[in-house]
Image: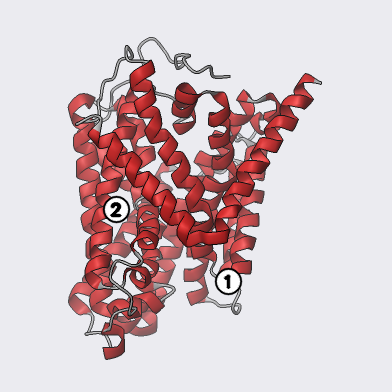
Amino acid sequence: MMPTHEKSPQSSSGPAQVLSLGDATAIIVGLIIGAGIFKTPSIVAGSSGSETAMVLAWIAGGVVSLIGAMCYAELATAYPSAGGEYHFIGRAFGRIPAFFYAWARMTVIVAGSIAVFAFVFGDYCARLLSFGEHSSSIYAALIVVVLTVVNIVGIEAGKTTQNVLTVLEVLGLVIVLVVGLFLSPAPPNEAAQTASAHSSWSGVGLAMIFVLFTYGGWNDGAYISAEVRNRERNMSRALFYSLGLVTALYVLVNLAYLKGLGLAGMAKSDAVAADLLARVWGTTGEKLISVMIAIATLTSINGAMIVGARSNYALGREWPFLRFLGHWDQARGSPRNAYLVQGAIALLLVGLGAIERKGFQTLVDFTAPVFWAFFLVTGLSLFTLRATDSGAARPYRVPLYPVTPALFVVSCAYMLYSSLAYTGVGALFGVGVLALGAVVMLLGQWAVRA
């Protein structure tokens, strides 16, 4: 239970400051770079309307992410807690808004990420062995089931395995850079034309939805701020360095795609990296990069599963009517029920993506409004806690307050508007999920009192 102004439970000494600037930078880079960069560039290219607009969208994504990360760094150092946004929102606005965030995280945000990355895995596996038009959906469902079972059994990927998979992911990007920028021939004339006849800026909102999805992970990076040595100085430097590095890498990768495929060629591709390497090395190149990306994608899926199941477990521990989620299987060392519920929800979302025939894009579209709504609320919690808990120690303070957090809040509001506008009737999906959460909370509290 978390009253609005209750202090975080923690040891008197607090988290140990053991991470160097290099450690923090490497961790944040690893959290940000994921499977999305092998899928979203085609959608961004199709939405941008021009090469310039597309490149600027990727640069803007890095800037917005940096502003948000600085806001999260202040919250995380002032109120260190494994609950993350759930804890920040609860302190600022009370338990009920915090419950809705945790509910949305369980049913939409994390489960949606698992399903989205599963479709990336499916798209590249389908390049290796196709079962027909539903191949991506079949692979996506299978990997959700397999990794859920693996985690329930308690066989967690070790540090070495995770590092190898991350190296494969980065190596895939390096191969794309080298092939696209230095080895690929000029794209066919038709691929060199612009992807659409619309204004360069007409689809900027939709493009930014997918750009910022690809930059996702910096919010988790802010949680290490309490453990960084000389954090008042090094936390901001780590954020600048990591997001600067990732932004440069993402921009270069997209320039490589542009040089090898052209804007229209990117927009038409469902697996841009494989198509790029196929132009240079034929089927061998296509298969090589597809295998590397499919394997590396497992890191994103497994990481989301581990974090999501544990936050669901914490939710079950704090709300009596969801106590079944708070069961920990001591024999296997895993929150079994939380994994089962999470896996079932992810499978339902995979089914939704399969029905819509645009699995990846459908799921990002449908989950984005909920995601940005709670990012907005988290940004507002910084203003609220500055006013209501001004005496709290803040080892890291966001620079240029209140301008910087105001820019983050405005950015979130714009992204919420864009996601609602481009999703259209699909936005009702998120509304329905939150309405269901209200029903569950009311019925659950009634049952506990009965």
Q: Nearer the viewer, residue 335 or 423?
A: 423
Q: CA distance from mark 1 to mark 2?
A: 27 Å
Q: Nearer the viewer, residue 44 or 412?
A: 412
Q: Which residue is mark 1?
A: 357
Structure colour scheme: secondary structure
User: What crowding class fits label 1: few (fewer than 14 Cα within 10 Å), some (14-19), or many (20 or more)?
Assistant: some
Helix or strand or loop: what does disc 2 sit on?
A: helix
Q: Nearer the viewer, residue 211 or 255?
A: 211
User: What crowding class fits label 2: few (fewer than 14 Cα within 10 Å), some (14-19), or many (20 or more)?
Assistant: many
At a point 53% along the width and 36% down the height, the residue shown is 101
At a point 44% along the width and 31% down the height, the residue shown is 84
Name the mark on residue 61.
Answer: 2
Residue 230 point in image, percent of width and height: 20, 24
Asked if residue 291 shows in the view, the reply is: yes
Q: Nearer the viewer, residue 404 or 105?
A: 404
Name the mark on residue 81.
Answer: none
Q: Determine whether, in the image, residue 236 is placed left or right of residue 44.
A: left
Residue 283 point in image, percent of width and height: 39, 83
**Residue type at mark 1?**
Arg
Tag 1 and tag 2, C-beta contact below 8 Å: no
The mark total stands at 2
At a point 35% along the width and 84% down the height, the residue shown is 282
Helix or strand or loop: what does disc 1 sit on?
A: loop
**Farthest residue toward the top?**
12
Q: Determine whether, in the image, residue 416 is placed left or right of residue 18.
A: right
Residue 139 point in image, percent of width and height: 58, 66
